[in-house]
Image (cartoon, grey):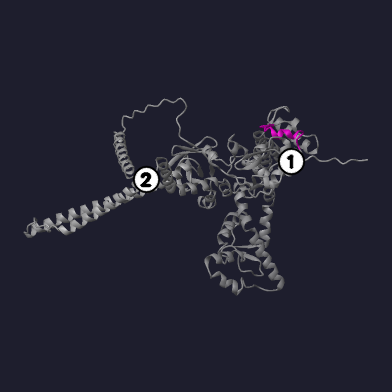
């Protein structure tokens, strides 16, 4: 009696990061069983081949349909493909720079790769016990193509029709060959029908030529080389299609005359003779090596790369382990931007700023786009500012960007997507806006008064000059208007009185409370002013997500990859003094500070006012 084996389901392990569960991929079993993991639990479903801090050649080998993206089925197929050729798939869980012959299976697939690996190792002067690296395979592919080209060049025909000019002459002949064959075929058809000649084109085609220059060229390219007649002779100088006249002139001077002699027409038999003359050279050209890869060498290179890179790719595709555990750089992190006393580690490369910003703005993350230049090279990045404030972030400010290779680039801000950065910034934002508004009003008032004073001074000087020229006295002045100035002072007094009354009412109401109630009132005022800004910032900071930033770069992010306050603070580091640093607080160029005495005076005034109000309150009771 046969008993069925019950398949034990895979026990997956997950870790919580970024507000969602991510699968742990640590063993070869985890890799091989990914096909059983529901794709709804994958962080990404697709990633671009280009623009990542990952070997582009490896991604292109995994991208079987060559559409520029690696998708889930292609990644799973690459895992199975590699496992089918290795004795122990556990090698995939321990990334290695090289592949040894002992790692390959002894079946048909493995033996073919092993035999090719032996040849490559011998060609490189290595033994069978040495590891085969990616560099070794790339060198082998280069040598393979070099050998093919050398063998092809050695097979070059001994006699060349035009000597050293044969390649150029062959290219000219090849350019007009199809049109010549077409012309002589039309001539044979005309002779078969018993006609002497035929119309070159129809009336509709003739009208189309004169409709526009762009249409004319396209139409003329399809017309015959010349007027077709039953004689079968092609004119080489006069009566040629104007679009093909230049090519036919080169054909006549560089091919026909050197090989057939001076002539103004070309018969079909002569055209066949020319093709026969170039036939041997044409066959040799057609047998030239194409820039294709040796399939076995390509498979060997693919396996070496997958052994090295597959685990890293899985942990940046199925999960974002390196990014969320801060154990390394994710493959989408382009480097670190230093600007405004901060370092921003979440930087991605961008091809089109406007297109990227359109989608990335929904991430609720403050993004700063920078053009980066280095020794004639140029790139664009988007840096996420996730801590601090945006007070000093302005278009045109400069910083330094260090890419994943450690190279430094000059970075200049070109665009900023404004979003809340921190709760601290949100709390002080209303007060800063109020101070900025008051400052702007004072500046406008001072500017207008200064302009009025300047205009008055110029006007007075002009009037004095005119009076002096006219012989009149400049002493006469407008009579003092007592009523006007009395009205001004009355208005000022009323305004000051209203402000004083309002402040007195607030003070009386405040001190009519018990002492323990006053802090709650002050707290309420703070919440009234900063509360809306804090609440809005809180919701936006809690909803910050990585997805739109990567989606705008061609990823297909499947998870709600959030960036909370604590994690955001780790992505953007603020300037801090190093541990055990010594600090001298004496600044020889600091402005003289009288703030301490100001605080003392205002403190004394406040104490006196409080005491008086409290005494009045006690007396009234």
- Residue 152 is left or right of residue 515, and the answer is right
Q: Are marks 1 and 2 in contact (CB under 8 Å)?
A: no
Residue 589: x and y in percent read 31, 32
Q: Is residue 492 above or below residue 522?
A: below
Residue 409: x and y in percent read 48, 39
Q: Is residue 392 above or below residue 466?
A: above
Q: CA distance from mark 1 to mark 2?
A: 73 Å
Of residues 262 and 442, the one drawn nearer to the viewer in this rendering: 442
Of residues 244 and 329, the one drawn nearer to the viewer in this rendering: 329
Q: How many marks?
A: 2
Q: Write the start and end of the magenta stretch as one range.
A: 85-98
Asked whether the viewer can see residue 395, the reply is no
Locate residue 233: give its quadrant: bottom right
Residues packed near mark 1 inside 10 Å, few (<14), some (14 to 19) or many (20 plus): some
The residue tagged 1 is 33
Residue 301: x and y in percent read 69, 38
Asked whether the viewer can see residue 550, the reply is yes
**Dot 1: element:** helix
Residues packed near mark 2 inside 10 Å, few (<14), some (14 to 19) or many (20 plus): some
Of residues 523 and 549, the one drawn nearer to the viewer in this rendering: 523
**Dot 2: element:** loop
Task: Tell which residue pokes out farthest to the left in this image.
Answer: 471
Q: Is residue 126 above or below residue 509?
A: above
The tag on residue 86 is none
In which quadrant will I find the C terminus? top left
Determine if the magenta segment contains residue 94.
yes
* Closer to the eye: label 1 or 2: 2
The residue tagged 2 is 512
Determine if the magenta segment contains residue 193.
no
């Amino acid at each position: 009696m046969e008993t069925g084996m019950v398949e034990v389901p895979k026990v997956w392990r997950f870790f919580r990061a970024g507000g969602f569960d991510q699968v742990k991929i640590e063993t070869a079993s985890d890799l091989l069983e990914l096909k059983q993991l529901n794709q709804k639990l994958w962080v990404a479903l697709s990633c671009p081949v280009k623009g990542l801090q990952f070997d582009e050649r490896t991604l292109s080998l995994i991208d079987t349909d060559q559409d520029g993206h690696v998708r889930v089925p292609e990644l799973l197929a690459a895992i199975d493909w590699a496992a089918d050729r290795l004795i122990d798939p556990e090698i995939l869980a321990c990334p290695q720079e090289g592949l040894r012959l002992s790692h390959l299976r002894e079946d048909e697939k493995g033996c073919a790769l092993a035999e090719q690996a032996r040849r490559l190792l011998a060609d490189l002067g290595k033994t069978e016990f040495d590891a085969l690296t990616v560099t070794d395979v790339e060198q082998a592919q280069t040598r393979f193509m070099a050998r093919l080209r050398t063998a092809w060049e050695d097979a070059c025909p001994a006699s060349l029709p035009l000597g050293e000019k044969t390649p150029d002459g062959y290219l000219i002949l090849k350019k007009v060959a199809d049109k010549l064959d077409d012309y002589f075929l039309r001539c044979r058809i005309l002779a078969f029908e018993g006609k002497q000649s035929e119309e070159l084109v129809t009336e509709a085609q003739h009208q189309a030529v004169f409709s526009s220059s762009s249409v004319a060229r396209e139409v003329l390219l399809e017309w015959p080389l010349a007027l077709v007649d039953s004689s079968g002779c092609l004119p080489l100088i006069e009566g040629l299609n104007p679009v093909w006249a230049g090519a036919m002139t080169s054909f006549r001077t560089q091919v026909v005359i050197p090989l057939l002699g001076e002539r103004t027409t070309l018969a079909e038999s002569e055209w066949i003779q020319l093709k026969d003359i170039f036939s041997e050279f044409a066959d040799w050209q057609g047998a030239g090596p194409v820039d294709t890869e040796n399939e076995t060498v390509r498979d060997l290179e693919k396996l070496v790369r997958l052994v090295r890179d597959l685990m890293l790719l899985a942990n940046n595709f199925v999960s974002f382990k390196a990014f969320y555990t801060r154990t390394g750089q994710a493959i989408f992190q382009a480097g670190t931007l230093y600007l405004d006393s901060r370092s921003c580690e979440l930087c991605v490369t961008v091809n089109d700023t406007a297109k990227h910003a359109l989608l990335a703005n929904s991430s609720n993350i403050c993004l700063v786009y920078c053009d980066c230049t280095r020794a004639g090279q140029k790139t664009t990045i988007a840096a996420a500012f996730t801590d601090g404030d945006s007070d000093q972030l302005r278009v045109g400010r400069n910083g330094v960007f260090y890419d994943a290779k450690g190279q430094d680039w000059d970075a200049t801000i070109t665009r900023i997507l404004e979003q809340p950065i921190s709760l601290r910034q949100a709390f002080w934002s209303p007060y800063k806006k109020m101070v900025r508004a008051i400052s702007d009003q004072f500046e406008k008032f001072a500017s207008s008064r200064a302009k009025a004073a300047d205009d008055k001074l110029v006007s007075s000087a002009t009037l004095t000059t005119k009076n002096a020229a006219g012989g009149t006295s400049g002493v006469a002045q407008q009579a003092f208007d007592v009523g006007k100035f009395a009205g001004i002072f009355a208005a000022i007094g009323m305004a000051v009185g209203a402000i004083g009354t309002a402040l007195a009412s607030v003070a009386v109401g405040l001190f009519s409370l018990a002492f323990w109630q006053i802090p709650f009132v002050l707290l309420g005022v703070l919440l009234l002013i900063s509360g809306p800004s804090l609440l809005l910032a809180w919701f936006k900071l809690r909803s910050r997500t990585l997805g739109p930033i990567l989606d705008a770069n061609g990823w297909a992010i499947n998870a709600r990859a959030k960036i909370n306050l604590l994690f955001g603070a780790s992505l953007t580091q603020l300037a801090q003094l190093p541990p055990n640093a010594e600090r001298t607080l004496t600044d020889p160029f600091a402005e003289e500070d009288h703030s301490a005495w100001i605080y003392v005076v205002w403190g004394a005034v406040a104490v006196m006012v409080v005491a008086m109000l409290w005494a009045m309150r006690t007396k009234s009771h």
